[in-house]
Amino acid sequence: MDNFCEKIFAGDVRASARLMRLVDDRTAGYEEYMKPVWKRAGRAHIIGITGAPGSGKSTMTDQLITRFRSEGKTVGVVAIDPTSPFSGGAILGDRIRMAGHSTDEGVFIRSVGTRGHLGGLSVSTMDITAVMDAMGKDVIIIETVGVGQDEVEIAMVADTCIVVTVPGMGDDIQAIKAGIFEIADIFIVNKADRDGAERTAGDLEMMLEITPRRSGWKVPVLRTAASSGEGIDEVVSVINAHKAFCGGNIKSARLEDRLLHVAYGVVREKIVREVFSEEKLRSLLREGADPYSAVDRLWHGEARGVGAAE
């Protein structure tokens, strides 16, 4: 195990990709590899990009990769994609848009399926992010699937959280109504060459003026046209400014939140795996138990074996 992990710490792509597969599939024994990996976490700057479908998140990510690479930084990308209902894997729409970086050894892109997980993140996202961190990536970008108002988990795991919106899709109203308004460190009005961009940006700026921010960071509203690269340099500049603003205190707090988020996920997985397995539940339901009674019996240890009697 030590030799395998040392390869990852040295940036070995094949070993890292193999561990990411074990993590994503939740293969038995993956936890032992993740213990030393998590001890190396906290070095990379993690950027979360969220927003409604069609707002240009993938194009934005592609442009950010290019700019960070021009600064000499290595980049990891975790692209959260919808899960295929047939294979269970990720539908690789986001990765296709970043295909131009596929031959760049300084870029590692991993697509992860949501597998029905709400909140915009896959259960294994944080472990995969930690592997990229342990590889030595300077910047890690997490691009969420784009489910809208529920996509607030990213605020718990990203050092810098970017919310992307566009004019003409009602996103200005969604951002004002939804929890995603409070999680943004940076707002971006993308496709700013469209009509209504100034109004959307103005609405966001007005709401930010009356929304208190505990961190002291003044959330900017930037305008971009990611498809042409317009405004991307300013986005990178503000990301770097936010990284400097965070310093040690905020980053340390967010790393602690990240570790707690993973720990809770491990607890949930163990409970489901060891107590609430589908096989055990089906057995009790076939015996005539209602759903509530079946769960109660499993929770209180009355059905430790498949088909166990009361």
Image (spheres, grey):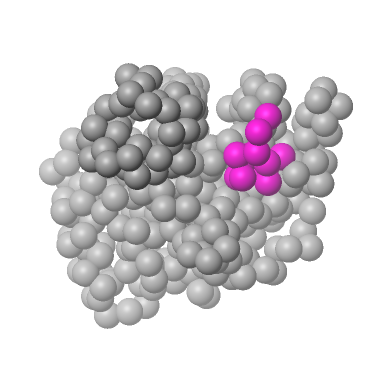
Q: Is residue 32 left or right of residue 265?
A: right
| Residue 101 x, y percent position in the rendering | 70, 63
Q: Please name the residue shown 79% across and 53% down the image.
A: 105
In the foreground, 241 or 107: 107
- The answer to if 33 sits in the magenta stretch is no
**Quadrant into which the N terminus falls:** top right
In the image, 9 versus 56, the foreground residue is: 9
Count of labels shown? 0
Q: Is residue 145 above or below residue 169?
A: above
Residue 246 in view (yes/no): no
Q: Give the main secondary structure, helix, strand or loop, of the magenta stretch.
A: helix
Coordinates of residue 226 in the picture (x, y in percent):
48, 69
**Residue shown at 54% from the left, 59% from the top:** 88
Residue 39 in the image, given as x and y percentages of width and height: 64, 20
Task: Locate residue 2: give its quadrant.
Answer: top right
- List the single residue furthest toward the bottom: 195
Residue 65 lies, in percent from the top left, at: 62, 57
Query: Bounds of the magenta span?
Result: 19-29
Residue 23, magenta (yes or no): yes
